[in-house]
Image (cartoon, grey):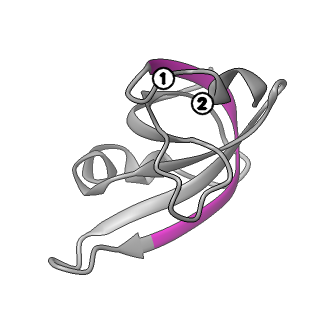
Amino acid sequence: MNNIQSLAEGSSVSISGTITELIQLFTKKKDEPLAALKIKSPKGTVPAVLFPKQYKEYGDLLVEGRDALFKGTISKRTDDREQPQLNISEVILAK
């Protein structure tokens, strides 16, 4: 998504799209579940993550192929990522 690359670290965004990839992971320290996913919208695909606190609340809503509105903040850590990711804080299912 071209416009996400131009946003500043920590910017609040909402993306409406479809979950195209979903991987459940676990934290190293406490072995808590979290999810890494890709969201496809008309403007492109963005990587996203749902950390343990949000995973407890919204994890059951995550299904590949499901349409939803994802709210969160932009993270531009560049350790091994080519593009910024969305740190999801809220998931609202499409009607």
**Residue 78: percent from the left, percent from the top?**
53, 54
Category of crowding for the residue at label 2, using alpha-carbon neighbours closer than 10 angstroms: few (below 14), some (14–19), many (at least 20): some
Q: Is residue 5 magenta?
A: no
Q: Residue at x 48, y 23 (%)?
A: 8
Nearer to the camera, 4 or 27: 4
Q: Which residues are magenta?
A: 12-24
**Residue 81: percent from the left, percent from the top?**
61, 57
Three-letter amino acid code of the residue under disc 2: Ala
- The residue that mark 2 highlights is 68
Category of crowding for the residue at label 1, using alpha-carbon neighbours closer than 10 angstroms: few (below 14), some (14–19), many (at least 20): few
**Residue 58: percent from the left, percent from the top?**
37, 44
Q: Residue at x 64, y 22 (%)?
A: 6
Q: Residue at x 26, y 53 (%)?
A: 56
Q: Is residue 20 magenta?
A: yes
| 28 left or right of 37 in image | left
Nearer to the camera, 87 or 55: 87
Main SS of the magenta part reads strand
Q: Is residue 64 above or below residue 75?
A: below
Q: Is residue 52 above or below residue 26?
A: above
Three-letter amino acid code of the residue under disc 1: Ala
**Could you say whether the residue bearing mark 1 is in a helix, strand or loop?**
loop
Q: CA distance from mark 1 to mark 2?
A: 24 Å
- The residue that mark 1 highlights is 8
**Could you say whether the residue bearing mark 2 is in a helix, strand or loop?**
strand
The N terminus lies in quadrant: top right
The C terminus lies in quadrant: top right
Q: Residue furthest left?
A: 30
Q: Quadrant of residue 54?
A: top left
Q: Is residue 35 above or below residue 90?
A: below
Q: Quadrant of residue 66?
A: top right
**Residue 64: percent from the left, percent from the top?**
68, 55
Q: Earlier in the sequence, mark 1 or mark 2?
A: 1
